[in-house]
Amino acid sequence: MNLFTKNAFIAFALVALLTGNVTAGVQVFAQVDSSADIYVGEKFGYHIIIDGENKSGQADLTPLAKYNPQSAGNRDVSQTSISIVNGRTSRETTKRYVMSYSLTANQLGRISLPPITVMLDGKNYQTNPLEVNILKPGTTDQLNLEVTLSEQQCYVGQPVIMTIKFYISADIGDFQFNIPAFTNDAFYLEEPDTSNPQAKEFNLGNGITVLVSQYRTTHNGKDSILLSFSKVLIPKYSGEIEIPPASVSADVAVGRSRSRDRFFDGFFGSRKEYKRFMVSSQPLKLTVLPLPQDDKPFGFYGLVGRYTISASATPTKVNVGDPITLTIKVGGGKYLKPVQWPALEQISELAQNFKIPSEKATPAIENGYKAFTQTIRANNDKVAEIPPIPLAYFDTEKGRYAVAKTEPIKLEVSPSKMLTNADLEGKDFAPVNKEVEVIKKGLSANYEGLDVLTNQTFSPLSAVVSPDYAPVWAGPLILLIVSAMIKFLTHTTPEKVAQKRRRNAASIATGKLKKISSTAAQQRHELLTSVMKQYIGDRFDRTAGSLTGDDCQEVLAAATQDRRTAEKFKEIIVNCEAARYAAIEASIGSTQIKEVIKLIQTIDKKTRK
């Protein structure tokens, strides 16, 4: 996202000069992403700009700790300019590097972000302080957020499933979750074992993703869309853990206004007006009990809950050394990810009577069980069974440790058969004694005498001039020449590939847009947005998947110097994305698609000048 205009950089440079951040042509300063209002509970962008270098520095974010800083990626934004003076061409490169972070607005009003220290090439630079105004969003009964825990009381290490349900009864645009429990140091965070195959991955930020399921339902007497997802929380320590309220803020459509531009009147009928609202859940409390230190069984590695274990083997009639496939299934718990491979080598009877390979297959979770498969081999014919395999766990219902065991598996093991020479040679083995007979014609190997010998000495010179060897050396030579010519004619570079992608961006986008009319009506909004973002990505060397409507507007405004066109482009994307959770009143037909094609052609024409 290019948020730094020419005027902004001039201002940053002045700040850097005043704060003494210029050393050997390097300037370091900070900027907040203020392209949109910032609301309490939401994340906002904080950027460190290194002007004069195209590499990252080491930032000490300790002064920003209360805002929970998280890396949002770094990028090199160096630019090369070409100027022609008196027929002479000169090229100048401006080095610039941006380190981006997300901060969480946790209080209302104006907040001050203190300077931070950035180390670069052994030198320390200090950024400028910043002030940010944090707004309070409105409230509405058209949004509702519910957060529940599968348990109100648990033991240390016992998995607890947190479920988040977000009910939507209005047309919404952009929305953002803030779930403090997911960044709480009191918990390990894991994915649930089961999930809806129709669920879609959603990025909550801070490197946390969830699988969101979407349903239509009735909530509080209103037709609603329900977005639901879960995470497994595993408490690290005992005590009363206070879980702050989760919240979600969203742009909610509050009305429509007629656009002054006929383009939008024809495309969407009128322009939706949005206002930011926020809804929060109730705070939660989780009581975490410590595990007792007495009577802890051998082999206990932290399983908490109730578990079962069973085993099967095949075949059960074998010779010494034959492979036996042992399958162990562990079930009973709601969350099976913590279950580890059974320590077979620690079972003395099993280790003494069987060869147990160190290699282990990856376990599989299916039908409520975690299955482990291992191949073992009996090492003597005295073995009568596979002994019970234990599983130690802490039973949360009984409040004490327990050990579940598999049933012993009966085996019939026979001694290995000793192989004799007769076994190796076969029962019908008899020596073969046949004399080689001289045949009158052919088989010259049966003739004796020096006159049948031929000089087979190899000469490189004779091979070059001999017609018999010509195909041997001429073929590779011709192949080398042809491949060299093909390489020369088709030689390309990453710069040429990028130029070709930029050059063909408009034609490719136009071709895709023309095909949208033939798709299902409910898919057209999403397809149109995808094509428009892909065009911006291809034409301006951006990553299409990470672009937003605001990103596209800023890129186009900087490239075309035409804010009106840039706003049109953004407006279409925003309205199409809103259709993901609430239907847009006007459908997208061939007329609207032609308008978008004209818009892309206009952008392409202006950027080629």
Image: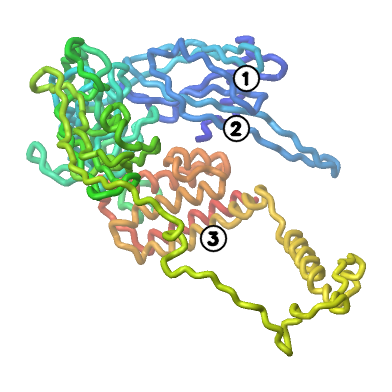
Residue 315 image point, x, y percent: 25, 50
Residue 259 image point, x, y percent: 36, 46
Marks 1 and 2, Cα distance to the nearest angstrom? Answer: 18 Å
Work out whether residue 44 or residue 355 is closer to the camera in this orientation and state it. 355
Q: Amino acid at mark 2?
A: Asp
Q: Is residue 522 above or below residue 39?
A: below
Residue 523 image point, x, y percent: 32, 56
Q: Mark 1 highlights which residue? A: 13
SS at circle 3:
helix
Q: Is residue 338 above or below residue 508?
A: above
In primary-sequence order, the first of circles 1 and 2 is 1
Q: Mark 2 highlights which residue? A: 76
SS at circle 2:
strand
In primary-sequence order, the first of circles 3 and 2 is 2
Work out whether residue 609 or residue 313 is closer to the camera in this orientation and state it. 313
Q: Which mark is residue 93?
A: none
Q: Amino acid at mark 1?
A: Ala
Q: Residue at x 74, y 40 (%)?
A: 82
Q: Amino acid at mark 3?
A: Ser
Q: Residue at x 79, y 68 (%)?
A: 478
Q: Tell us which disc is closer to us: 3 or 1.
A: 3
- Within 10 Å of disc 1 (Cα), the crowding (few <14, some 14-19, many 20+) is some
Q: Tell us which disc is closer to us: 1 or 2.
A: 2
Q: Which mark is residue 507?
A: 3
In primary-sequence order, the first of circles 3 and 1 is 1
